[in-house]
Image (spheres, helix red, strand yellow):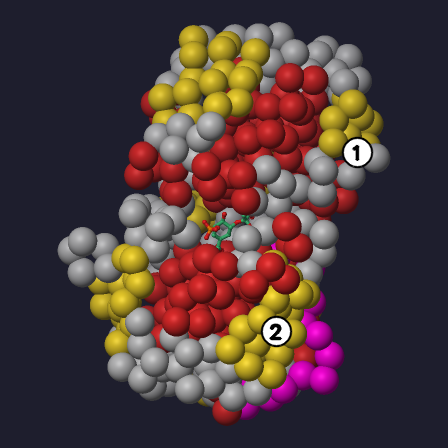
């Protein structure tokens, strides 16, 4: 439990945003599948990514990790072997779903488990198509929930039209496809984050993308590595301080090395549309993932409507966007975001509940939420419910709330941003 108060002097200073969670996971996974050594700089040592390291260590891969430096000694897919223990993905949906794709191609038996939240998140979206490719998968409620048991091997290619825009679904199928007979393709309703496609190419895999967005890989391709991966800062972590600087009076904050992959930058477009003052410097575009420093100052914000193709590009930022909307003049409508219901918590419910507790004018809809601003927020007893993004939303709300805020289950934040409170303190000190 953490006691938090508002700040009168604003947020000021420079912070280096920790490594991107999605890219950190993939660096260990693909490094483990590859032949050769992969070194990773600015790896995110958050609990989710440590779960990924732990799973691959159990599959026989030698991995050295010291804070944000990681070395993976890959021996190719043949170097992965059956684990005598269950593979525990902790709180990480990315670890669970991408591992299912990888394990489906490997000719041995594996069992995946996770925490209470993982046990409620739907896995059929991945186990369904993987079964169609030939994987033998069992799990609670016909393979929809963990524990999931996989007997891999003998896969055939699949042309899959996904009903949801999900990088986890797309990645799991492509990773299985790499180990199958023939070509595997995935088509989504809107483009989801493309870190898998970018990084597989860096490992020497040919990934094709058609004009209609269909992504495909041919089976039998090897990942080869002598790679040094520089992980950019996580825009989903930066989002909390981008918004905090925009809504806390007297603020000016620079966030260094923030990832600018266009499939993730929906938050920056929304900030701009709402009237936030943003500027970019030190833009680096020579690697697979672009990044830059971003400076934000306190801004006058107005409500906006958010829906359609931008939703997958900002899905993890909806909690903090909802808080920002409470400080914007007018109405903000967030729609087409049903996917929020199957995250670490049902984020439509948890966002609305928690922001209502501190005085927001917010209501849930079937596929999102409607927020009316601008409202004065007050302190209260908030809970993360074990969801890192809900915890960080509550902590940022406390910076503008009148009176004390108590945040229960604040430790959940360690999943993606272990240095979050340290960074918040340093910006408060100025
Ligand atoms: O890994 P996990 O638990 O699913 O984490 C979340 C998050 O908020 O950090 C979602 F709850 O991010 C997902 C994201 O929502 C990470 C991810 C990825 O790395 O591929 C893709 C998105 O999920 P999805 O279901 O849309 O593919």
**Residue under the point 52% across and 8% down:** 374
Quarter that holds the C terminus = top right
Q: Quadrant of residue 57?
A: bottom right
- 171 displayed left or right of 379: left
**Classed neighbour count for the residue bearing mark 2: other residues with Cα under 10 Å, few (<14), some (14–19), many (≥20):** many
Quarter of the figure with residue 392: top right
| Residue 255 image point, x, y percent | 51, 39
Q: Image point 31% across, 63% down: which residue?
A: 160
Q: Toward the viewer: 396 or 362?
A: 362
Query: Pointer 1 and pointer 2: residues touching (CB < 8 Å)?
Result: no
Comparing labels 1 and 2, the label whose residue is closer to the camera: 2
Residue 155 position within the rendered picture, expressed as x and y whole percent measured from the top left? 39, 82
Residue 156 sits above or below residue 172 on the image: below
Residue that sits furthest to the front in the current view: 142
Quadrant of the drawing holding the N terminus: top right
Is residue 164 rendered magenta in the image?
no
The numbered dot on residue 408 is 1
> What residue did someone put label 2 on?
149
| Mark 1 vs 2, N-terminal side | 2
Q: Is mark 1 within 8 Å of ligand 1?
A: no
Left-right relation of 16 to 210:
right
Q: Position of residue 278 (x, y in %)?
A: 40, 28
Measuring from the top left, give residue 376's x and y in whole percent.
62, 8
Rendered residue at 68%/60% (across/down): 114
Question: Magenta part of the protein: which range?
Answer: 79-92
Q: Is residue 162 left or right of residue 38?
A: left
Q: Secondary structure at mark 1?
A: strand
Residue that sits furthest to the bottom in the current view: 78
Is residue 219 in view from this perspective? yes
Q: Residue at x 43, y 12 (%)?
A: 331
Instruction: State the SS at label 2.
Output: strand
């Amino acid at each position: 439990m953490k006691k938090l108060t508002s700040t009168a002097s604003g947020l000021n200073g420079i912070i280096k945003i920790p490594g991107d969670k999605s890219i950190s996971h993939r660096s260990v996974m693909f490094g483990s599948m590859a032949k050769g050594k992969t070194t990773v700089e600015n790896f995110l040592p958050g609990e989710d990514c440590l779960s990924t390291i732990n799973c691959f260590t159990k599959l026989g891969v030698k991995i050295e990790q010291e804070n944000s430096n990681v070395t993976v000694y890959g021996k190719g897919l043949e170097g992965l072997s059956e684990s005598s223990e269950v593979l525990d993905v902790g709180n990480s949906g990315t670890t669970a779903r991408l591992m299912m794709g990888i394990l489906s191609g490997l000719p041995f038996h594996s069992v995946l488990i996770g925490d209470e939240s993982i046990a409620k998140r739907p896995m059929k979206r991945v186990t369904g198509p993987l079964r169609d490719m030939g994987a033998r998968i069992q799990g609670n409620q016909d393979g929809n929930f963990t524990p999931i048991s996989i007997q891999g091997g003998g896969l055939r290619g699949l042309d899959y039209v996904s009903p949801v825009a999900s990088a986890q679904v797309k990645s799991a199928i492509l990773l299985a496809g790499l180990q199958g007979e023939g070509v595997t393709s995935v088509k989504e309703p809107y483009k989801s984050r493309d870190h898998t496609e970018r990084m597989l190419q860096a490992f020497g895999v040919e990934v094709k993308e058609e004009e209609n967005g269909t992504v495909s890989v041919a089976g039998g391709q090897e990942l080869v590595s002598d790679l040094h991966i520089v992980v950019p800062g996580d825009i989903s972590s930066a989002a909390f301080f981008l918004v905090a600087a925009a809504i806390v009076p007297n603020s000016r904050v620079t966030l260094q090395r923030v990832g600018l992959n266009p499939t993730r930058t929906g938050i920056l477009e929304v900030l701009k549309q709402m009237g936030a003052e943003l500027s970019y410097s030190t833009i680096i575009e020579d690697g697979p993932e672009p990044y830059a420093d971003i400076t934000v100052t306190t801004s006058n914000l107005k409500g906006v409507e958010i829906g359609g193709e931008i939703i997958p590009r900002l899905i993890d930022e909806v909690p903090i966007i909802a808080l920002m909307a409470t400080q914007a003049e007018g109405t903000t409508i967030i729609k087409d975001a049903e996917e929020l219901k199957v995250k670490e918590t049902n984020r439509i419910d948890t966002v609305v509940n928690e922001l209502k507790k501190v005085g927001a004018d917010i209501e849930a809809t079937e596929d999102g939420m409607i927020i009316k601003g601008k409202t004065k927020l007050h302190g209260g007893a908030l809970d993360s419910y074990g969801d890192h993004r809900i915890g960080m939303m509550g902590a940022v709300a406390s910076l503008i709330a009148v009176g004390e805020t108590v945040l229960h289950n604040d430790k959940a934040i360690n999943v993606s941003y272990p240095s979050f409170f340290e960074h918040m303190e340093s910006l408060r000190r100025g």
